[in-house]
Every structure is written in C-alpha cells, then in structure tokens.
Image (tube, rainbow, N blue to C red):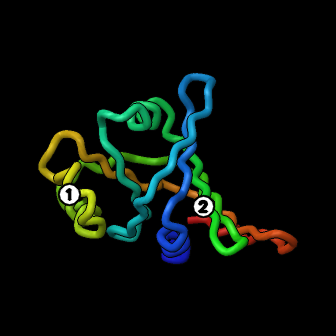
Amino acid sequence: MERICQFLKEAGVYYLATTDGDQPRVRPFGTAHIFEGKLYIQTGKIKPVSKQIEKNSKVEICAFKDGKWVRVAGELCSDDRMEAKKSMLDAYPNLRGMYDENDDNTQVLYFLKGVATFSSFGAPDEVVEF
C-alpha cells in the first residue's frame, strides 16, 4: 500500500472515477495518505463526488508518471473521526485554507479493499491487492 500511495503522491495528480446514475464522472484529485494502515483520499461533503460515492462506493483512480501508470479499483468508506481528518490535513497543510477537521464539510475516505494494477508500455502488469 505504501508503494501505491507513493506513486500517487509522486504523480501529483490522479483521476478519480465515480458514477452518477449511468454516467461515468472523472475528476482530478491530489490527496493520498496512509492512516492506520489504510489508503485515504480527501474531498468535501458538499461536492457532487461525495454524493456519488455515497450512492455507489465503487471507484477507480488512475495516475501516470514516467511512462508508467497505476489503476486502483475498490470501495471507499467515509471516516468521520477527527483524528483521520486531522492526519490528512496535517499531511496536506495547503488544504487548511478550505478545510478543517472541525468543520462539517471535510471528508476523508479510505479504501475498504482494493486492487492496484501497475502498468507500463510493453511490460507485464503487476497486480497488488490490499
């Protein structure tokens, strides 16, 4: 899981795919954090992505760097604990202008289970379950 998180951080931006009814939705994200042995991401509860994940927790993320990419498929679960929110925001202090662990908007989500597939052109895929 550390390798997955590190790849996402080094890529800088990854893309999160959700569904909105029968319509796929993809948008850029930039937070990836390990807390209590789980891979977390962060968003705001007022955003459509939060509502989409609430309706269908199955998501996929994809990041690309240096001719390699990773796809992470899995189910997300919201963690409303202040400790989880604080850990994320401490790791990404630039978000503190928009989010705070004490507000009603900050949302951190972790992968209940997931499958990461590392790929590159011409090389066989490497699959990591977590």
Q: Residues within 10 Å of mark 2 (few under 14, many from 20)?
A: many
Where is 93 relative to 44, above or below?
below
Where is 25 relative to 94, above or below?
above
x, y percentage for residue 82? Answer: 17, 55
The amino acid beneath tag 2 is: Ala
The amino acid beneath tag 1 is: Arg
Determine the secondary structure under disc 2. strand
Looking at the image, residue 24 sits to the left or right of residue 5; the answer is right
Disc on res. 109:
none
x, y percentage for residue 87? Answer: 25, 66
Looking at the image, residue 44 sits to the left or right of residue 97; the answer is right
**Label 1 – label 2 distance at C-alpha:** 24 Å
Residue receiving disc 2: 63
Residue receiving disc 1: 96
Determine the secondary structure under disc 1. helix
Location of the C terminus by quadrant is bottom right
